[in-house]
Amino acid sequence: MKGLTIHAVAPTRICDVGGWTDTWFSETGRIFNIAISPLVEVQVRVLDSACDTSDVMVRAENYQERYRVDPALQPPGKHPLIEAALSEIQLPQNCQLEVNIFSSAPPGASMGTSAAVSVALIGALDALTEGRLLPADVAAWAHRLETEKLGLECGVQDQIASAMGGVNLIEMPAYPNAVSQRVLPDPQTLWELEQRLLLIYIGKPHQSSEIHRRVIADLGEKPAEDRRLVELRQLAGQAADALMEGDFKALGDVFNKNTAIQRALHPDLVCPDFEEIIRVSGDYHALGCKVNGAGGDGGSVAILCSGDLYEKRKMEKQLLEAGYQSLPVLLASEGLRVWSAESS
């Protein structure tokens, strides 16, 4: 096994219409989302297959950190999600491993990056064991890491989007069980969608678990029946229908309605920076804006532009001059990909 290198990549996601309904307190849910690049990249190298150590050398490239992890020890440590995955997978004995993790998506961008990290890491480590997990199994395992192992508030959609890729309509009949149906309009519609999307990061991370706690407290004794969650479930199906019909105006309307419900769930979910981006987008005739993920005082917003590329570039320039960051958007038709290579 010495000299073996395992590669794994997994997409992030945006435009999670219905995103609050994939939670334990919603009980049932329906979610539309779009898997994209930037990807999370994981590389696992077998440095020595004859040594007597079980430690794993981890390089968290985005944080410029390199440190050893004993998989037998329980998290938390420097990066609890990474350490939780290492402790859960049955790694080869007497084998020295080096794990490198990188994402070009900024931390806390509300794009499901942490889920993509766990999906890619589990996929890579699984390749060192006998048998192979299916993408849906990887997604379920990654979700359990965040909720059961680390005790975080976490819906099911991010892991599914990362493992499966593409544009998805996810049905959750009973938390946490969910199935994903690929939304497949004609290729030209997907090309047009990709070109119309503009992803703006406001420049600071957010803590989605804290936002979850505040919203849950406001939902009362029967959160699953709250009219706002009912409306979010309906909007997910409407988003899928609009994209299948190539009706970008209708899709933009859905994005706007979803963002309005996020405001109604808690006023802090759509912070002043998001409101300013939405206001500017209206000046350039954008069709809709979806605050990604839970929202809050950090993260990103996806803008569905009018289709006029000159207007899109002018809007992007104005937002950049205002101090925001534009992130590249490429639709990710594939989800988790894992392959191996021998060192040359």
Image (cartoon, rainbow, N blue to C red):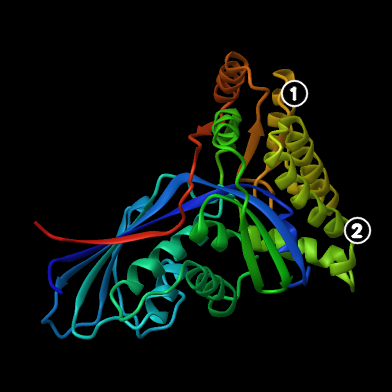
Residue 34 position (above or below residue 280): below
- Give the quarter of the figure containing the C terminus: bottom left
Q: In this view, does 165 lie to the left or right of 292?
A: left
Secondary structure of the residue carrying numbered label 1: helix
> What is the x, y in percent for residue 227?
91, 58
Residue 245 position (above or below residue 29): above
Residue 220 position (above or below residue 93): above
Among the two numbered marks 2 and 1 on one chain, the one whose residue lies closer to the N terminus? 2
Mark 2 crowdedness (10 Å alpha carbons): few <14, some 14-19, many ≥20: few
Q: Which residue is drawn at 34% across and 79% down?
A: 131
Q: How far apart are marks 2 and 1 (CA)?
A: 28 Å
- Give the quarter of the figure containing the N terminus: bottom left
- For badge 2, the amino acid type reads Arg
Secondary structure of the residue carrying numbered label 2: helix
Q: Is residue 330 left or right of residue 69?
A: right
**Which of the two residues, 103 or 275, is positioned nearer the viewer here?**
103
The residue under label 2 is: 227
**Which of the two residues, 85 or 324, is positioned nearer the viewer here?**
85
**Res. 154 visible in picture:** no
Choose top left, top right, bottom left or bottom right for residue 4.
bottom left
User: Which disc number belongs to residue 282?
Assistant: 1
- For badge 1, the amino acid type reads Gly
